[in-house]
C-alpha cells in the first residue's frame, strides 16, 4: 500500500453520488455475493460430506474461508474508502482495513501454494502420497499459511503506527520502500513455487500419459488425456497469474519510483486481484466431480431432507 501523501480536504473530497459511484456499488455487491456464495458452497460441502474429509479438501476449505472473508470484509470496506476516502480516515480504522486486506490476500495466495504442493505429491509421488500428505500435515500447512500471513500483515501495518496523521487520506493500497519485502513474501515467492510445481506436474502427467501407449490403443484417447491435463493446469496457472500479477508488478514499479502509474490504475489491478477469490471455487472445486454432486445436493435442498453426510458422491 502506498502511504498516500494527499491530505483530505473536506470540500474537495466530498464525492459526487454520480453514475460511476452507483455502478461501482452495484459491481461490488454482485462480486461480494458471488465470492461469498461460491466459497460458502465449498465450505458447506467439505464440512457436511464425510467423503470430502481429506487432506486436499481441508486445504481447499482453508482457501474457501479466506476467500469468503475477502468478499465479506475487505471488498465492502474498500468500496467505502474508494467512494469516501475521508469518511474512514480515522487512523485505527484505516490500519485495521489494511491489516485484514494483507492478511486475507496473503493467506489466500499461500493456501494456493499449499494446494500446489499437495497436487505435486498426488501426481508425481502417488505411491507415497498418503504417507507424506495426511491430515496432520495438511493442518500444519494451513497453520503455517495463516501464521505467516498474520506476521506479514502485522509487520507491514505496524510500521506506520508512529506516523499518525489525522488529515492523511486512507489509501486503498500501500507501496513504500518499507513495505517492499511484503510483495516478495506475499506473491513473488509463492508464485514461483506454484509455477515451478505445476510445470513439473504437467511434465509428469505427460510422461505418464505416454507411458500407457501400450495399453491405450487409440491415439485420440491419449491425445484427449494430454489435452485435458494441459487445459486444467493452464486454467489454474492462468487465473492466478492473470488476477494478481498486474497488481504486484505495478506495485513494485510504483514503490521504486521509476515509473509513474496512476493510483486509479493500481486500484483497478487490486480489484482484479480480489476477483481471484471468486474464481478460486470454480478452479479448485468445480473441476472435481464429487464437488459438483455436493453442490447439486445443496442447491436442491436434499441435504435438509435427511442425513446424507455419508453419501457417496
Image (cartoon, rainbow, N blue to C red):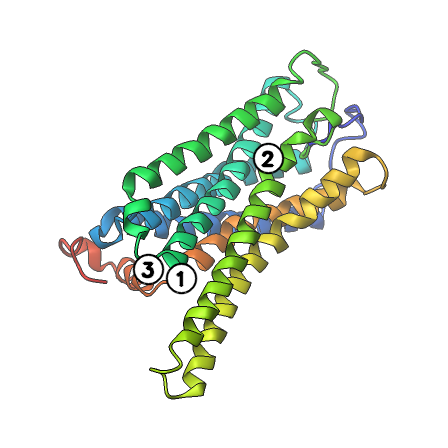
Q: Quadrant of the C terminus?
A: bottom left
Q: Residues within 10 Å of mark 3 (few under 14, many from 20)?
A: many
Q: Which mark is residue 185?
A: 2
Left or right: 238 with respect to 207? right
Instruction: Out of 260 and 115, give the one closest to the viewer.
Output: 115
Q: Toward the viewer: 175 or 180?
A: 180
Badges 3 and 1: C-beta atoms under 8 Å apart?
yes
Q: State the residue position of label 3.
A: 291
| N-terminal-most mark, 2 or 3 | 2
State the SS at label 1: loop
Q: Position of residue 1 (x, y in %)?
A: 68, 32
Identify the residue at horizontal 43%, vertical 44% (top origin): 63
Residue drawn at point x = 33 percent, y = 65 percent: 289
* Residue 7: % across, % down: 79, 23
Other-residue count near label 1 (Cα within 10 Å), few / some / many at <14 / 14–19 / ≥20: some
Upstream in sequence: badge 3 or badge 1: 1
Tag on residue 286?
1
Cα separation, mark 2 vs mark 1, equals 29 Å
Query: Compared with residue 229, is residue 246 higher up or lower down, i.e. above or below?
Result: above
Secondary structure of the residue carrying tag 2 is helix
> Distance between the Cα atoms at labels 3 and 1?
6 Å
Residue 37: in sight, yes or no? Answer: no
Q: Secondary structure at mark 3?
A: helix
Q: On residue 232, which mark appears?
A: none
Amino acid at each position: 500500500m502506498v502511504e498516500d501523501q494527499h491530505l483530505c480536504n473536506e470540500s474537495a473530497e466530498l464525492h459526487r453520488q454520480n453514475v460511476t459511484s452507483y455502478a461501482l456499488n452495484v459491481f461490488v455487491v454482485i462480486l461480494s455475493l458471488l465470492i461469498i456464495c461460491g466459497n460458502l458452497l465449498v465450505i458447506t460441502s467439505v464440512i457436511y460430506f464425510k467423503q470430502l474429509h481429506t487432506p486436499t479438501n481441508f486445504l481447499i476449505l482453508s482457501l474457501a474461508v479466506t476467500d469468503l472473508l475477502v468478499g465479506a470484509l475487505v471488498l465492502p470496506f474498500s468500496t467505502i474508502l474508494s467512494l469516501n476516502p475521508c469518511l474512514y480516515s480515522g487512523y485505527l480504522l484505516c490500519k485495521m482495513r489494511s491489516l485484514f486486506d494483507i492478511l486475507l490476500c496473503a493467506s489466500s495466495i499461500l493456501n494456493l501454494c499449499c494446494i500446489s504442493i499437495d497436487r505435486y505429491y498426488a501426481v508425481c509421488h502417488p505411491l507415497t502420497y498418503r504417507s507424506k500428505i495426511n491430515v496432520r500435515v495438511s493442518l500444519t500447512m494451513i497453520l503455517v499459511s495463516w501464521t505467516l500471513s498474520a506476521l506479514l500483515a502485522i509487520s507491514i501495518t505496524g510500521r506506520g503506527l508512529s506516523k499518525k496523521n489525522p488529515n492523511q487520506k486512507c489509501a486503498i493500497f500501500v507501496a513504500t520502500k518499507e513495505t517492499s519485502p511484503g510483495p516478495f513474501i506475499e506473491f513473488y515467492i509463492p508464485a514461483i513455487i506454484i509455477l515451478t510445481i505445476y510445470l513439473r506436474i504437467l511434465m509428469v502427467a505427460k510422461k505418464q500419459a505416454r507411458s500407457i501407449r501400450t495399453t491405450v490403443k487409440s491415439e485420440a484417447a491419449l491425445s484427449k488425456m494430454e489435452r485435458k491435463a494441459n487445459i486444467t493446469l493452464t486454467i489454474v496457472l492462468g487465473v492466478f497469474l492473470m488476477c494478481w500479477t498486474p497488481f504486484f508488478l505495478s506495485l513494485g514499479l510504483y514503490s521504486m519510483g521509476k515509473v509513474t502509474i496512476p493510483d486509479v490504475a493500481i486500484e483497478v489491478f487490486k480489484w482484479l486481484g480480489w476477483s481471484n477469490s471468486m474464481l478460486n471455487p470454480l478452479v479448485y472445486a468445480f473441476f472435481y466431480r464429487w464437488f459438483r454432486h455436493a453442490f447439486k445436493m445443496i442447491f436442491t435442498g436434499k441435504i435438509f431432507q435427511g442425513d446424507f453426510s455419508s453419501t457417496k458422491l
